[in-house]
Amino acid sequence: MVSSLEMAKWTQEIEEEITLLIKEWLKQKGKTQKDLKASIGADSERMPILLKVFQEEYTSGGLPKLAALLCAIDQSWSVNNSQNIKKHKNQDPFGQLDLLLQEIKEDCDT
């Protein structure tokens, strides 16, 4: 017996909806199609190629599988963004200024 998930059909309407969703999602996240390409391991960052990956996910598991993939990507981006923010906060924002002040002091002493 074949489950209804395995029989999920990719239609033009679904493709259009997913395209709009992806474009808005990328805009909201401040990400690009290149970022998405890297996250899903696609061959190209062009939308038709990205959609092909999503179509394969949808065809093999329906909307739940596609949603799970998108959620995993979103989670990954959120974790990476949080790590980048922490790394940036841990950097000494005055490090460059300290070096400049040291050079000025040295110049004044000579």
Image (spheres, rainbow, N blue to C red):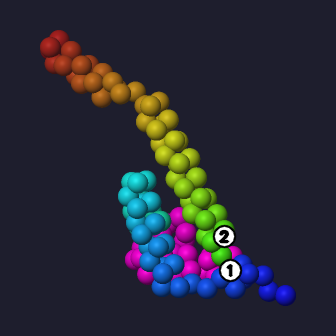
What quarter of the picture does the C terminus occupy? Answer: top left
| Residue plotted at (60% across, 81% down) | 56
Type of amino acid under label 2: Lys
Query: Does residue 71 show up?
Result: yes
Q: Which residue extends farthest right? A: 1
**Label 2–label 1 contact, CB within 8 A:** yes
Residue 60, numbered circle: 1
Instruction: Check residue 43 for magenta coloring.
Output: yes
How many labels were placed on the picture?
2
Tell me, yes or no, whether the highlighted magenta stretch contains residue 10. Answer: no
Disc 2 is placed on an element classified as helix
Q: Quadrant of the N terminus?
A: bottom right
Q: Which residue is mark 2?
A: 65
Mark 1 closeness class: few <14, some 14–19, many ≥20 residues within 10 Å: some
Q: Nearer the viewer, residue 64 or 43?
A: 64
**Which percent across, then down, holds residue 48?**
43, 81
Q: Residues within 10 Å of mark 2 (few under 14, many from 20)?
A: some
Percent position of residue 104, x then y:
19, 19
- Report x, y in % for residue 51: 49, 78
Camera-side residue of 73 and 88? 73
Q: Is residue 92 above or below residue 60?
A: above
In whole angstroms, how far apart are the C-alphas of marks 2 and 1?
A: 8 Å
Disc 1 residue type? Ser
Q: Which residues are magenta?
A: 37-61
